[in-house]
Every structure is written in structure tokens, then in C-alpha cells.
Amino acid sequence: MDYNKLYAQEAQLLDRFFVNKKPKSLPYSVERFGATRLVRVNPKYVCYPIDVPLGVSLADLKRIQADIERIIFNNRSKHGITDEVKVLIQEQPSQIVVARVDPLTLTYASRPRDGKPRFVLLGKSFVGGKSQPEVINLNHPDTCHVLVGGKTGCGKSRMLYQMILSACEHSEPTDLQIALVDIGGKALSAFSKLPHCAAYVTELAETKALLAHFEKQLVGAQDTYTTRTMIVIDEAPALTSTGDKETDTEFARLLKVLAERGRAYGISLVLGAQNPTDSSVPVEVRRNLGVRVAGMCSESAMSEIILDKGNREAADLTLQGTFIVRHSGQSRLTFSYYLTDDEMINEIARLKSEYDPCTQIDLLVGDGDVMLPQVAINAAVDVLKQYTNDDGTLETGYVMPTKRAIADALGRKSITGNAADKFDRFLDFVVSIYKSGNLVL
């Protein structure tokens, strides 16, 4: 079947509908190109540019959205195409956008290769009949922080993967580093092998320590940093909707502070949020995130949470890997480049062979004067497991081996003498969280 003829037919049907609409015709028409109605086709959508007279809004057009969807569905169903039709009505440029019958995938191999340091690739956007790479500059105050969200299956994770890799491909680790927050350790673990990765945390305690570490950097002269750090949080609601009010409040505070003041100290936030809500991504955090990237949303309210109040465009998206990107006062229909697992592994290996790894951030986890890096806690827990009975009690003899494991992880030789009291507190701290069965503090 010639789909281009199908799309041209739909343009004619829409134009005829505007003229014959009862009780009165609508002041719209599908733009012409010569004698035919104009149809623009991009990899995933068909766009029907609409001529809107000056002084006329698109409000009436949006009110008859269901009629437009029915016209297109009825036409396609005559040809055996019965997929649900949802249209997106855009104001700038004015056009009706509907999914292609034959959508294409933008491969990661086809991405632009001429990126700049500290720039992040979001995909390819289409404005009018022209396409352009959709990139953001982490150094710019309007585009240094990003919120990426949408419903399950929208392509949020692949968007984050593309953003991380594209940023690292064009920046050396001395110029750009990444810090990855991956609660549960399932989504971003592969990127911990990047030479740009200064921290990879999977527990709430580590995450709190990491964000507190960056908060302490927000002092002194601004804009004097030499290395920018991009903090990528796969699922922000895992921090702000834990069920513990004190924990949620503290993480919301840390994110707000870093978003408000981080740019001038070389810190960028990239927050992912699957099915975000007002409470899981608080407004005091969102208002500081200048770039909004919304994939398919299950309802208008979700689109407004991600993009901003009144912007419901993402609720009309129907294809995975399709996003509405809003920043600097504009919204654009954007398609991400699909990164396969093999491409991701190969590109990480290439970057690892090309650059020396950056220095790792040494995180201290604990409370008060008992602060330990996670590596020391893990080493102590490994020893405690060896001395644990089937009923969960600890056998005698675990004290000195556990202290020694902590000392080795810290690079300390002595655990007695002047150091004895400190290592007693270290031991009590580790044993208490081990017995609680919860290493997420």
C-alpha cells in the first residue's frame, strides 16, 4: 500500500471537514503546496500544517479533537488499519500531528557525531518541514538541569542512556564527570564502567551522602569550576516517596538546593521519573529544572507535571521514543535515538580504552562522628556474614576480624591504642545496621 497516498487523502478529508462543519464552518484549512494539501512526514508522525487566520485561536480545533481522530481512524480502517488514533494539536507551528502507519526507528548509529563538550543529545526534533539535532548545553543556566518522565514503556530509560553516552562521547573526564544514582542497581549499572563515572550509588544511605557531598561544594566564588558533574538519578521518586516523611523531606531539600545553586558550581541534575506525581517530584524541585522531556503520558495531569501547567501535549503521544521537549520557552516534538544493548556496551568499552578514569568520590555513610565509606561497611558486612548462625545470631570471635576489615578498607593499620574507641563505635554502628537487616539508612 502507498501510505503517502493515504496521508494525502487524510489531508483532503480534514480540509473538507473544516469547510463543512455544522452548524458553522471552522476558520482553518490544511496548508497548500501548489494544488495539493501539504503533508509533512517525519520518522514517526504525519504532520498536517494548519493555516490559522490572525486573531483566531486553536481552541475550537482542540475542542473537536475527537472528531478529527474519528475521521482519520475511519479512513485508515477502510484499508484494514485499525490501530487507535490519537492526534496532537500543536500551536507553534500550527499543525495536526498523528502517528504514521509505518513508523521508523532512529538508530543510534545515525546520530550526529559533531557534538561539543558539555552538550547533551536528546534526539532529533522537527520544526515545520525541517529536522535538527535537539541538544542542550549543561553550562547554560536555562538548560543545565533536566526532568525526564512519562508512563511505563515511553522510552525514558533509553533516553537517559542516550543522554549519558552522548555527554561522555564529546567530553573528557577532566571536563565532565557523571555521578549515577541507581536505587536497586538495575538501570544504570553498565555506565558505572565509564571513565567519566565519579560515583555510582544504589542505596539510600549512599545517595544521601553523595548529594550532601555536592551540597558542601556550593561555597566560595561562583563559576570557577574546571570540571562539571552531571548527576543522573534514574528514578527520583525512589528518593522523595520512600514512605518515611523525614527521609522524603531531606531528599527534596537536597535536590532543591542543588537545582537552585548547582549550575554556578559545576553541578547539573538529570532526574528521571516514571509515572511522576506532584508529591514524588515536588514543585519546589521542578521549578528549577529548565529542561523538560516528556514521553507518552497516561493522562493530561502527568503531562502538566513534567512539562508545566497547561501543557498537555505529551498525553497525546502514542509511540515509544517520542517526546515533547520544552525549554527556553519552546516545545518541540523530538525523537530519541534508539541505543541497543550491544551499542551501549561497545561504546562504553571504547570510551574506557580512550580515557583514564576520573577520581572516585569517597562517600562517608553514618551519623554524627561515626562516618564510614560504603566500601568499609560492605567489607565489614562480608565478615559478619561468615560469623552468622542459621538463627541470625553472631558467633563469638567476629569482633577483631570485623574491625580489621574496616581498617583495611580505610587504609588504617592500627585498631587498638588511641584508635580503639573509634573502632568500637565503627563496630557497633555496622553491627546495628547488619542486625536490622536493612543497609539502606
Image (tube, grey):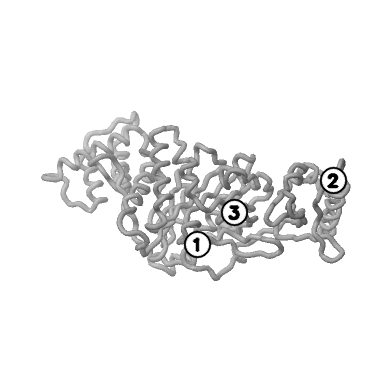
Q: Nearer the viewer, residue 199 or 121?
A: 121
Write down the quadrant of residue 130 in the picture.
bottom right
Inspect the image, locate mark 2, and give the three-letter code of the amino acid beneath it.
Asn
Check residue 325 in the rendering and tell me which mark sits there, or answer none: 3
Mark 2 lies on residue: 74
The Cα–Cα distance between marks 1 and 2, rounded to whole angstroms, is 44 Å
The Cα–Cα distance between marks 2 and 3, rounded to whole angstroms, is 31 Å
Check residue 137 in the rendering and tell me which mark sits there, or answer none: 1
Residue 191 in the figure: left or right of residue 33: left
Residue 416 in the figure: left or right of residue 56: left
Q: Position of residue 104 (x, y in %)?
A: 70, 58
Upstream in the sequence, badge 1 or badge 2? Answer: 2
Q: Residue furthest top?
A: 391
Tell me if residue 348 can be seen: no
Upstream in the sequence, badge 2 or badge 3? Answer: 2
Residue at 62% in and 54% down: 331
Inspect the image, locate mark 1, and give the three-letter code of the amino acid beneath it.
Asn
Seen in the picture, residue 111 relative to 19 is either above or below; the reply is below
Q: Residue furthest front?
A: 55
- Quadrant where the C terminus is found in the figure: top left
Residue 258 in the figure: left or right of residue 89: left
Residue 36 in the figure: left or right of residue 102: right
Circle 3: is it few (<14), some (14-19), or many (20+) Cα within 10 Å?
A: many
Residue at 68% in and 46% down: 316
Q: Position of residue 199 (x, y in %)?
A: 38, 54
Secondary element under disc 3, as helix, strand or loop, is strand
